[in-house]
Image: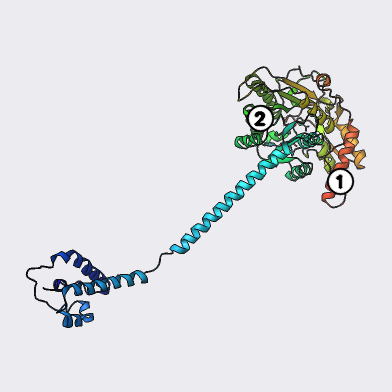
Amino acid sequence: MKPIISSHLDAPPPMASSSSSSSSAAAAASSSCSAGGGGGNPKPKPEKPPYNHPYHRLLPRWHHHHHHVPSLSKLSIWSFFALALFLALFLLSPKPHAPSSSSSSSSAAREERRRSLRAAAAAGAWERSVRASAAPRRGAPGGLSVLVTGAAGFVGCHAAAALRRRGDGVVGLDSFNDYYDPSLKRARAALLWRAGVFVVEGDINDAPLLRKVFDAAPFSHVLHLAAQAGVRHALKNPSSYVASNVNGLVSLLEACRSADPQPAVVWASSSSVYGLNTRTPFSESDRTDRPASLYAATKKAGEEIAHVYNHIYGLSITGLRFFTVYGPWGRPDMAYFSFTRDILRGKPITVFEGPGHATVARDFTYIDDIVRGCLAAVDTAGKSTGSRGKKRGPAPLRVYNLGNTAPVPVAELVTILERLLKAKAIRKVVKMPRNGDVQFTHANISLAERELGYRPTTNLHTGLKKFVRWYLDYYGKKSGRHGGAGSISAS
Ligand SMILES: NC(=O)c1ccc[n+]([C@@H]2O[C@H](COP(=O)([O-])OP(=O)(O)OC[C@H]3O[C@@H](n4cnc5c(N)ncnc54)[C@H](O)[C@@H]3O)[C@@H](O)[C@H]2O)c1
């Protein structure tokens, strides 16, 4: 029997290159398998030494010494060679970085797992903070649970602290925007934190966030004080008023109407809705359809929007028209605050006067009086009647003036400040530009008196004294000259 392998050695030689040698060996091995059944090649060709074949140099002895070796052994030997070569190539071939890449991908997966665990833990901690903060103090009479928006703001921080002091559960929400120095907002929030009030940082336009907050705690009330405040800023950034005071209000009311239970809503409108109204003192039944500023227009729009949500969804809604609120932890953009700063720095202050030297006056209302009004509005709110977004019956819709009923000319405000600060103001009296301010505000508070028991008790001199004490303490402390401003209680 002719060795099967010989037929291959007789075959035309493959290209004599080292690279092709392996493939020819492999080909030899594989074709030996396919030809295995052809052991009975009837007329094998005579054997010719494959001189041109590179194996020839390697395998001469096989031909010489093994032409008598049974063909099966030759096949096995060639197979063995082919397999050995194949194995050698396999072992020597560059290793893919499988172990390291799989270890790096598994470490990425571990890191991802750790990250999601951390996120879940943070979400859990966040939810626990909201729930704990929303829980009324055990044994507190009434024990409400109130979401206060704008809690890092001037009125918001005082109101949140007062609710907490009497034992209500309070959660704050604030965007900490930079309309004025955000570090003042952070300082207020830090005080609230120490008082046991957790302030969520976020925008009232963030509907998923609001849902999360309402899912975490069942609020009985929402005290909505977040807004773009100030009148003149609208000349620079009008859309911020629409964003917070119109869109933001709708977003918040949407969250309230779908919340279960539906909370009662008390929110800050403004005395500015009286606009060009000349009937004094301003009463809730007066015209409010002639706003003098975009700020006023957005607050007026808010009152109409409140009507809609009360009408369709049965939300209990109370609007409070604040009159020029002032006091410790106040707003740096307001006249009494910036006058104080500029008088102390020896910088001139601009005091407005009306046409024909007419007095510009404001019904300045001290923060503690406003806070008492807010709490009274919360306590008398009456329940929302809707559930799952459906109205189940009529709910209260109210609006109240919260003022002081004692307008003071701005010129007199400056005189009081001069006395308290023991410094002379450099007054620049100019005609009031038509930029949104009105000449005169004066609240008729008889409705709030009757229905809320609201009775302001702080006159401007007393209130400003408290403000100046806080101002010197807070800013003195910041510049390292004074002691600490530690409490939010304004009284
Ligand atoms: N202070 C006054 O004299 C006065 C007078 C009338 C009405 N108001 C109204 O009372 C409320 C409180 O006023 P304030 O003097 O405390 O003002 P503030 O600016 O000190 O407080 C408002 C807070 O709301 C936050 N805020 C604004 N837009 C927000 C948004 N889209 N999402 C979340 N937070 C947002 C701000 O960061 C700020 O901390 C406002 O609605 C204001 O319009 C105030």
Q: Is residue 52 visible from the viewing direction of this image? A: yes
Measured as percent of width and height from the top left, residue 442 is found at 82, 23
Q: Position of residue 140 (x, y in %)?
A: 80, 33
Kind of residue at badge 1: Asp
Tell me the quadrant of the picture where the N terminus can be found.
bottom left
Q: Nearer the viewer, residue 167 or 310?
A: 167
Taking the image as shown, residue 2 lies to the left or right of residue 474, namely left
Q: Quadrant of residue 145?
A: top right
> What numbered label is drawn on residue 11?
none
Mark 1 to mark 2 CA distance (whole Å): 35 Å
Residue holding disc 2: 249
For the point 90% across and 35% down, the residue is 416
Label 2: element kind: helix
In this orientation, does residue 345 appear? no
Marks 1,2: beta carbons within 8 A: no
Residue 278 relative to residue 304: left or right: right
Residue found 78% across the figure and 30% down from its top: 432
Which residue carries the number 1 mark?
Answer: 473
* Amino acid, disc 2: Leu
Percent x, y for residue 142? 78, 29
